[in-house]
Amino acid sequence: MLHKVRIYSRFERLWHWSQAALIISMGATGFEIHGTYYLLGFERAVEFHTTAAWGLIGLWAFAIFWHLTTGQWQHYIPTREKLLAVTRFYAIDLFRGELHPYERTDHRKLNPLQRLAYLFFKLVMAPMLWITGLCYMFFNNWETWMLAPYLDLGTVATIHLAGAFLITGFLVIHVYMTTLGHSVFEHIRSMITGWEMVEEDKVVQATVQQAKLTEK
Ligand code: HEM
């Protein structure tokens, strides 16, 4: 029997959608700064990109605090359990109409591939962008802060641009993956409402597993 489970908290949904809006608008202004096209004009694009950057840095700081204080960071611990089955599902079984091998619950929200992808996002892509972005932003202070001998503007720009390409690729794959639920909008709907329908026996199994973990 299907059971309604709350997968995403209010803060998580707010953080997710504001992060999405900021990253999309920063991609749009960033590639204009790079010279890919003309939309707002260079000056306004830089102004928007810089303001949004502070918004994104603030949001990431809040999200890190939230993950640490609520224990939600544990959802990102990599696991090999069902990793091959989930990879095989997306590569082959999905196109044969088979069911997803991983039934998620509020205790195990992320399948093994999602854990790896989101961990890569948090530990590699995001730091690549904010560290080089801040170096870029404070270029005029490099001399005063005695950073000039260690930093090179060309390298900073290349790494920032590589991060922008990586995050854009991530976004495209991420949006495609969200459409692969029981229905096209199932996962998007749960990120809006917070709720998802899951098999009841899976909820019970996960609750028992969680209780065992807590006892340890
Ligand atoms: C907190 C994170 C970020 C900070 C602090 C930041 C900051 C900056 C700064 C200061 C610049 C140079 C503007 C100028 O020329 O005056 C820049 C350029 C750029 N940013 Fe960001 N940014 C961040 C996130 C992002 C994100 C998320 C994306 C893409 C989705 C992105 C894409 C770009 C691109 C493509 C450029 C042009 C690079 C070049 O041609 O050299 N940035 N960013």
Image (cartoon, grey):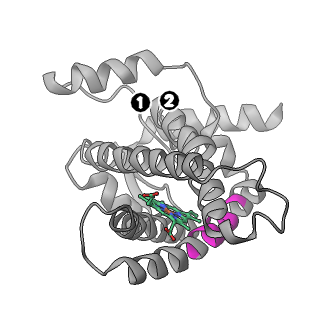
Q: Residue at x 60, y 75 (%)?
A: 54
Nearest to the observer: residue 131 or residue 137: 137
Asked whether the beta carbons under mark 1 and mark 2 sit within 8 Å of each other, the answer is yes
Q: Is residue 7 magenta?
A: no
Q: Is residue 167 above or below residue 119?
A: below
Is residue 80 shown left or right of residue 189?
right
> x%, y% of residue 59?
61, 69
- Mark 1, other Cα within 10 Å: few <14 / some 14–19 / many ≥20: some
Q: Is residue 157 above or below residue 9?
A: above
Between disc 1 and disc 2, the foreground one is 2
Nearest to the observer: residue 112 or residue 24: 24
Looking at the picture, which amino acid does disc 1 mark?
A: Tyr
Looking at the picture, which amino acid does disc 2 mark?
A: Pro
Please state the extent of the stretch shown in magenta in the rendering.
55-64
Q: Which residue is mark 2?
A: 112
Nearest to the observer: residue 209 or residue 137: 137
Q: Earlier in the sequence, mark 1 or mark 2?
A: 1
**Helix, strand or loop at mark 2:** helix
Could you tell me which quadrant the C terminus lies in? top right
Mark sitting on residue 30? none
Mark sitting on residue 102? 1
Is residue 33 shown left or right of residue 77?
left
> x%, y% of residue 39?
25, 76
Q: Confirm or reject: label 2 Cβ below 8 Å from ligand 1.
A: no
Nearest to the observer: residue 18 or residue 72: 18
> x%, y% of residue 167?
43, 49
Could you tell me which quadrant the N terminus lies in? top left
**Helix, strand or loop at mark 1:** loop
Q: Residue at x 73, y 51 (%)?
A: 71
Disc 1 from disc 2: Cα separation? 9 Å
Splitting the image into 4 quarters, where does residue 120 fall?
top right
- Mark 2, other Cα within 10 Å: few <14 / some 14–19 / many ≥20: many
